Amino acid sequence: MTVQDTTADLSAFTRDWQEWHTRQEARLAAPHGFLAITGLHWLSEEPQRFPEAPGAWSTGAEGVVVVLDDGEELVVDETPVRGEHRFGVLPERGGVDVVWGDAVIEVARRGGHDIVRPRHPDAPLRTAFTGTPAYAPDPRWAVTGRYTAFAEPRPTTVGAAVEGLEHVYDAPGRVEFELDGRPLALTAFPGLGPGGLMVLFTDATSGVTTYAANRALVLDPPAADGTVVLDFNRATNLPCAYTDLATCPLPPAENRLTVAVEAGEKIPRERGWA
């Protein structure tokens, strides 16, 4: 391969990464993205009102209920609702978004608890957002690994950004790979779409140049022979890197790498990165 070819390949690699990162930033800073969250409210059987959302909210054996006062209205599945509305029992890591004016009220279940998380486009965190710093993309951090499925998915309990909260994922398998000749492995969780995977990890840069608690890497479905590409240039921050109003999972213990993965997104400016 000539120098010209190598330069062209690097230019294309960098361009693809920049397009990907631009999309990531757009999702994060969308009018109702994670930067728009203004509160994290844990529901109980006792009805509660919150300053950023209408109605009195509670939960119990039959799921989440909101009771709206006269003059209050929410839009659920494009249908205006007034008075009492029952959301029913929500699935773990599931939820619904309901509309209130220009805001979205997220009603969800995290770690066995029902929550209400309002999202307002004028949230200061969102309006002040100027982007996430990141390492310059480098092809050396895109490596091919091999995925091995477990005989049965393994229930894996991990901690969360919220103290005392736990998440349980059914880990379908693990990915083995090498960095600088060093053999490594990561337990994988279900990712985006059928067959997709996600790994949560920390490494020797965590708390130094990258966010201390966790980073995430989304993987395409492995090939028929189990090969899968881990492009650590696309390692992202989870929402808890930007806001304390997130319930993000932490990596399992075996995914705490001792090598320095100097690739992907760095500590957000919102957490003090200059």
Image: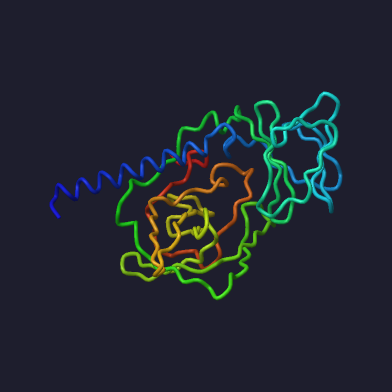
Residue at the bottom extreme of this rendering:
151
User: 211 left or right of 123?
Assistant: left
33 over 171 or under it: above or below: above
Residue at the left extreme of this rendering:
2
Q: Quadrant of residue 40?
A: top right
**Tag count in the figure?**
0
Residue at the spot 58% in from the left edge and 30% down from the top edge: 124
Residue at the spot 70% in from the left edge and 37% down from the top edge: 77
User: 138 left or right of 77?
Assistant: left
Residue at the spot 61% in from the left edge and 30% down from the top edge: 123
Q: Quadrant of residue 172?
A: bottom right
Q: Quadrant of the C terminus?
A: top left
Q: Where is residue 171? Give x, y as percent.
A: 56, 66
Q: Quadrant of the N terminus?
A: bottom left
Q: Quadrant of residue 251?
A: bottom right
User: 54 left or right of 119?
Assistant: right
- Observer-nearest residue: 131 or 73? 73
Residue at the spot 52% in from the left edge and 57% down from the top edge: 194
Q: Where is residue 95? Give x, y as percent.
A: 68, 46
User: 20 left or right of 38?
Assistant: left
206 over 103 or under it: above or below: below
Q: Where is residue 12? Give x, y as percent.
A: 27, 45
Q: Where is residue 272? Give x, y as percent.
A: 49, 41
Q: How is the image coloured?
A: rainbow
